[in-house]
Every structure is written in structure tokens, then in C-alpha cells.
Image (tube, grey):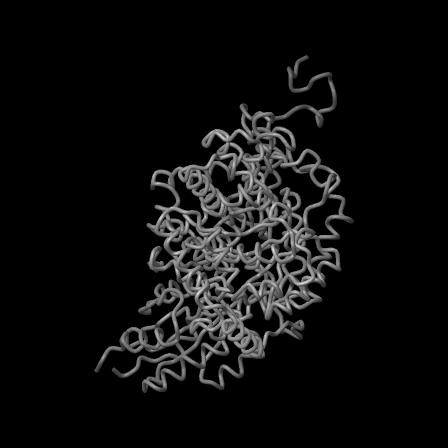
Amino acid sequence: MTEQRKLRLLVGKVGLDGHDRGAKIIARAFRDAGFEVIYTGLHQTPEMVVETAIQEDVDAVSLSILSGAHNYLFPRVLELLREKDASDIVVFGGGIIPDEDIPGLKQAGVLEVFTPGTSTDQVIRWVRENVRPRPL
Amino acid sequence: MSDGNARRGGGPPTTRSRTRAEWERGTLERALRRAPERGAEFTTVSSLEIDRLYTAEDLGPDWDSADRLGFPGEYPYTRGIHPTMYRGRLWTMRQFAGFGSAEDTNRRFKYLLEHGQTGLSVAFDLPTLMGRDSDDALARGEVGKEGVAVDTLADMETLFEGIPLDRVSTSMTINAPAAVIFCMYLAVAEKQGVPFEKLTGTLQNDILKEYIAQKEWIYPPRPSMRIITDLMSFCARSVPKWNTISISGYHIREAGSTAVQELAFTIADGIGYVRAGIDAGLDVDAFAPRLSFFWNSHNDFFEEICKMRAARRMWARIMRERFGAKDPRSWTCRFHTQTAGFSLTAQQPYNNVVRVAIQALAAVLGGTQSLHTNSLDETLALPSEEAVTIALRTQQIIAEESGVANTIDPLGGSYFVEALTDRMEREAMDYIERIDRQGGIVASIETGFPQKEIADAAYRYQRQVDDGAKTVVGVNRYGMAERSRPETLKVGPEVEEAQLRRLEEIKARRDASRLEASLAAMRRGAEGDENLLPLMLDAVREYATVQEISQALVPVFGTYQEVSVI
């Protein structure tokens, strides 16, 4: 019988957007909730994020995007994960994302999109319910 | 009289002079026994504890209004930088705008000018802010999204088409590549036949707060400071009415700092620029009068007003006493204010109109020189024209209906306002002394000190919102099912495609050898200590792109990679 290991989450800032308040808060909240957290730092390309996600064997990738480029960046990350046979890594995220863009993102494979006003507790609860450790 | 001095002249007991302690032991204690207060402590949005009541006792026996306040237009400027303040001239109503292509933004500028706005303010898109062209790989999906895309002089020509640059004052929110964009503005002026001496406006050009908060950089801090001192020196000689740096607390606050941290780190940045200018051999009074500030106006009404009053007094004292500036214009903390984007909620977005009105009123009572009021829909997307108009009308109502502009610093002398102003100044000066001990702001940034303080404050505040200790109306209290969202502005992918075509055309038209020569000359200038501005202006005239100019200096200056701490 194996004890379930801790969830490993990558918190990423993709694109040129430097607004890292939300990313840093959620990274710290995940850590305080007992998850293992890898924070990419700023100005990552989708390629860099996917590379790190695979190297670090994360269970989920959480992206924070406030620049308006979400319709390009989320699908690109998902596409690269598929190319690397890592589409079992859950992708979710948050930021300033208009309601009408959310269905399209979910259709592209983003499991959940959190918009401004969401509490860190809500996100943590969602992670506990929706992200499972990947078999390594 | 038997009652001694407590009942002078035999008047009724209700008018006798009493101490605060007597009131607390008597009237107050009885009231508290009947009904306790709403909470054990009352704090500002930044978690400063606020007392129940402020009296002359809070100011202390040594509090001297001549020393702390002075008069408007006189040292230490606590009550305002102008002798007549808004009775002479109202603040400049300056709405930040920029989206999509240069043509779109040019149309929005003309719309705002026709509707009574008195100054232009340019928002650039993220690639431009990072010194990257629209065709760079990292720019994908971001072109024209959060502001206007500017790659070459051609875009700036379009942006200001039909707007005579000697008749408007233009504020440009650009930092890492500020010198390049400024040269493009100068080149547009040249083409319009407007002499540089007539240009008025402001460049944000505050790279230190980028490392602290906004995170848009190209080079490491020290070479960035050299470009800034070159620009200050160039403007002192050739563009004397231009405000060279808008030392910005705004982004520090948006990144999650407290009001005191905003005040402290921003003034510390100001000290950093003045020190750099002096170290580069400039006379302090030759450049300091062109430095201005940019504050955030958040929800906590009095905290914001006191922050702005404290800032004026701190800057005046630092400039006169620490740097020995003699020109009173070097002592004055002139500032722009923007209402707090972070305070707006996506839930029940029309409530944002009320928040913005309160924040704008605080900025006016704080004595701002110009003001941007946020649009109600800014947490959803870029503002629509209707939302921008409401934001501008908010300022006009404060200016022309509320009566608050009739007198100068109407809150001056309030026990609470003066006590809080003093306290914020004291706490901010404590931070500044810590930063001085670390070797100044550049060294402090390199150790990550301000970044860590801000991240801690941001996390603390989020926990307070999550556990309900701080209320956000419509979010963690008074929520309801949402009906409709306001109409917002969309920037589609066609903007990026059009900009890429345009850039390709411009690149094809250029004289390659002249372009190369101008970039090489700039690089040689960077290796030595020649002023870079005239060299950049030459490259701009050859339609060199923002990225070509920025990257030409990387071999000399290097690039910056942040060490992220969470």
C-alpha cells in the first residue's frame, strides 16, 4: 500500500505580462496548503513552461495571465503538452479573462479558469477535488 | 471658585473644559458598557490601526503648524505646492488610453480632446513596454492588447497625426525603452516643425519600480540608471519643460504593498535618481525640478490623503536638507494620481463607479496635479468609450459640483489627518533609513528587499479578504447572482496581423547601411560615456525599431533575470 504523495503544482507566468501579484499569492497559498510548488518566475514562453512541467514531473500547470493573451497562450501550452505525450498534466489558471472567453478555453482543454475575486481557499479546494497525483 | 479651573466663569457643566481621559472614564465607558464597538480593532486597508478619536493630545506638545504645515506654495508644502491650488487652476484630467493600432488610439485621443480632456496619456502594449517588436516570438498574442503597439517612428507619426505637439501635454507610460520612445516623440515634433523647447509632457521612465513591482525591464539596474541620467542631462539642456521621470508608487501599490510601503519605496526610488544624477556630475537644481511623482489612490480615504500630504513634506525635506537643493522647484513633490485598479471588482461592476469617485475625491483632497480615474469595466477588459466617459465625468463632478476645490487643503489641521500624516511619514522614513543602511535603493533591489516586503503584504491582505477580516463589497460580502456584464472593448487578432504587415513594409523601405551605422554608433557611445540620447535619435530617424535599438545595447549592458522569491 502506498501513501499518496503530495501534489506537485507548477505556477507559471507566460508571456510578457509582469503582473505577478496573483501568481505569487497563489504559489504561496498552495505551499501553505501542503502542495509542492514550482514557480517559474516571469516572462516564460509556453515552451519553457512545458519543459519545466515535464522535468519537474508536476501534476498540474497553473497559469496566471492578465495581459489579454490567454486565447493564444493557454491553447499553446496544451498543444505542447500533447506533443510531449504529457496531456495527463492538468492545466488550469486565472487572471483577467472575460466570461465569454472561458467556454473556448475549456473546450481547448483548460480544466478550470478562475476570475478576479476568487479566494485562494476556493482554488485550493478545487485542486484537491480535481487534481490527482500522476503515476510516475 | 470651589471647582477650580474645571468650571471657569461658572458656566454649565456641559461646557467646562475636560481632558480626554475624563471623557474616556466617564461618557465613553458608560457607552461601551451599554453597547460594545463593532470590532476589537479598526484598521486601514493597509492594516494601520486607527484610534477611536483623535485630539490635540495625539499631535503632542511640540507639534508646530509652521514647521509641519507651512503655507500652500511654501516649504515644506504639506498643504499643497501652489499658493492658490485649485482656485487658480483645476488639476489636469488625464485619462490613460491606448489600444490596438496607432490609428485606433489616435482616434481615441481626438475623441478625448473634443470632450474636454486637457492632456494626453499613452498606454503602450506589452511588447513595446518590454522593448520588443511586434514580430518577436514573445510578442505573440500580445500585440495591441493592453495598449498601442509602437515598433518604429512610423507608428508614432500615426499616433500623433493631426495633434500639434506644442498644443498638448503628453504623458507616456513607458519605462525600460523610455529613451527610445522619447526620441520617437522628439522626431515627430521635428517633422511637425515644433521646437523641442516647446514640448511639454511626462515620461514615466521609472525603471527602479520595474525591478520592484511591475517587472518590465531590459538591462540590469545599473546600466538602466545610466540611460536615465543621460536622458535627464539631455532634457536639462534641450527639452527643458519635459518631466523626465514620473517616480511611481502606483505599480508598487498594485503589486500589493501597503500605503506606507508605497510612500517609502517610491521616495527611496526618488532618492536613487537624485543620487545618480549628482554622481553623474549634474547640478541637482538642473534636473530635480523636472522629477515628478505618481501615486495610487486606493479605497482607504484618509490613508490616501495623508500619504500624499506626507509625500510632499518628505520630498521637500529630503531635497533641501539631504541634497542641498536651492531652487524651490526642486523641493516640490508634484504628482499625478490614478485610482486603484486593483480595488475594482469584476462582480457587480457598476459599484466600481462609486469606488472610483471616493478614490478620486481622496486624490483631490490630497492635492494632486493631475488625475486618471479608472473605468468601471477595467477588471473585465479594456475600457469602453462609455465607461471612459463616466470616469471623466466623475472628475468633472468633483471639480465643479462638490465644492471641494473652493479652498486649499480643507482637511489640514484635523487632529486625525495631521496625526496620520505624521505617522505615515515616520514609518516611511524608517524604511528609507533601512534602505540607506543597505547601500541605497539599487543595492536594496538587488537583494530583493522591497520585493519581499511587498509580496508579504500582498499575501497578508489576500488572507484577510479570504477569511473575511477585510470586506470587499460584492465579492466576500453582499454577493449576488450576476445579471449582465457591461459592454467591453475587444481587440481582435486582426490588429496583430495588420501591425506585422505594417512593420514588414517599414523594414523593407529602410536604408540598411545608414540604419546599421546608426546602431553601431549608439553601441560605441554606450561603451564610452557619450550621452546616448542624440545617438538614439539618429537611429530613430532611420526608422530603427524599438527592439533593434534596445538589443543593440545588450552586448554592452547585458540583460536582467530576476531571482523570484515567493
Task: Tell me if residue A22 can be seen.
Answer: no
Which part of the image, by quadrant, shows the C terminus of chain B?
A: bottom left
Q: Residue furthest left?
A: A1
Q: Is residue A14 above or below residue B529?
A: below
| The one of B186 and A20 positioned closer to us in this rendering | B186
Q: Residue furthest right?
A: B401
| The one of B149 and B10 positioned closer to us in this rendering | B149
In the rendered image, residue B294, in percent from the top left (x then y), is placed at 56, 48
Q: In which quarter of the image is residue B276?
A: top left
Q: Is residue A8 above or below residue B464?
A: below
| The one of B424 and B168 positioned closer to us in this rendering | B168
Task: Tell me if residue B511 can be seen.
Answer: yes
Which part of the image, by quadrant, shows the N terminus of chain B?
A: top right
Q: Residue at x 48, y 71 (%)?
A: A94
Left or right side of B506 for B363: right
Q: How many marks?
A: 0
Q: Which residue lies furthest to the top in this view?
A: B1
Q: In this view, does B199 lie above or below A7?
A: above
In the rendered image, residue B19, in percent from the top left (x then y), is placed at 60, 26
Q: Residue at x 42, y 74 (%)?
A: B137
Left or right side of B132 for B375: right
In the rendered image, residue B125, in percent from the top left (x then y), is placed at 53, 66
| The one of B52 and B235 positioned closer to us in this rendering | B235
Q: Is residue B249 above or below residue B376?
A: above
In the rendered image, residue B241, in percent from the top left (x then y), is placed at 60, 44
